[in-house]
Amino acid sequence: MIKFLKNSLGLAIVIFFAMQCSGTRPEDIGIRENKQLKACPPSPNCVTSFCDPTDEEHYIESISFSGKADEAMNTLKEVILKQERSAIIVEKPNYIHAEFTTKLMRYVDDVEFLLDDKNKKIHVRSASRLGRKDFGVNRERIEKIRSDLGWK
């Protein structure tokens, strides 16, 4: 019985801490006054198409598209929702904020997409809520979405 209680307590502690990995949804993301997305912090757990391309740690190329903006955003939305453990939190005609949750530890990453119809680009920002490193997960996610879109 004591062994059962120890195992149960241990499992409860692990579950409690795993649930704490989601962090709090940020209130300071979205479209800025300068028509850009929030800059990445200095930590290596964020990528964005709005930083200097020489910043190899944080820079990622925006996603190019052709055709109508609303069709591009609808296709992007479909691709996002096909990803495992994804949810769209905010959706506007030119902006999407999605959350992606890791399977094991339930870490949540905030991913934003901002349409630039004039230049036929969708700017991106993908950032971990917690921790300092992401082991390339945010970059890989954006590249997978880019690939799944199939746009040249």
Image (tube, rainbow, N blue to C red):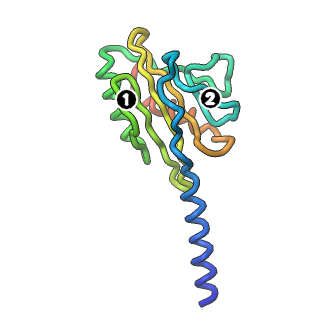
Relative vertical location of residue 33 with respect to residue 18 in this rendering, above or below: above
Position in image of residue 123 (x %, y %): 48, 21
Tell me if 17 is positioned left or right of 145 in this view.
right
Tell me if 4 is positioned left or right of 97 in this view.
right
Rendered residue at 49%/17% (across/down): 35
Label disc, if present, on residue 40 of the rendered structure: 2
Residue at the extreme bottom? 1
Position in image of residue 144 (x %, y %): 48, 33
Query: Of 34 and 151, which appears nearest the observer?
Result: 34
Query: Of 21 and 54, which appears nearest the observer?
Result: 21
Q: Amino acid at mark 2?
A: Cys
Tell how many labels.
2
Rendered residue at 40%/9% (across/down): 118
Tell me if 134 is positioned left or right of 125 in this view.
right
- The residue tagged with tag 1: helix, strand or loop? helix
Query: Of 62 and 13, which appears nearest the observer?
Result: 13
Relative vertical location of residue 126 with respect to residue 131 in this rendering, above or below: above
Position in image of residue 106 (x %, y %): 53, 53
CB under 8 Å between callouts 2 and 1? Answer: no
Rendered residue at 61%/68% (across/down): 13
- The residue tagged with tag 2: helix, strand or loop? loop
Label disc, if present, on residue 76 of the rendered structure: 1
Position in image of residue 128 (x %, y %): 58, 40
Tell me if 130 is positioned left or right of 70 in this view.
right
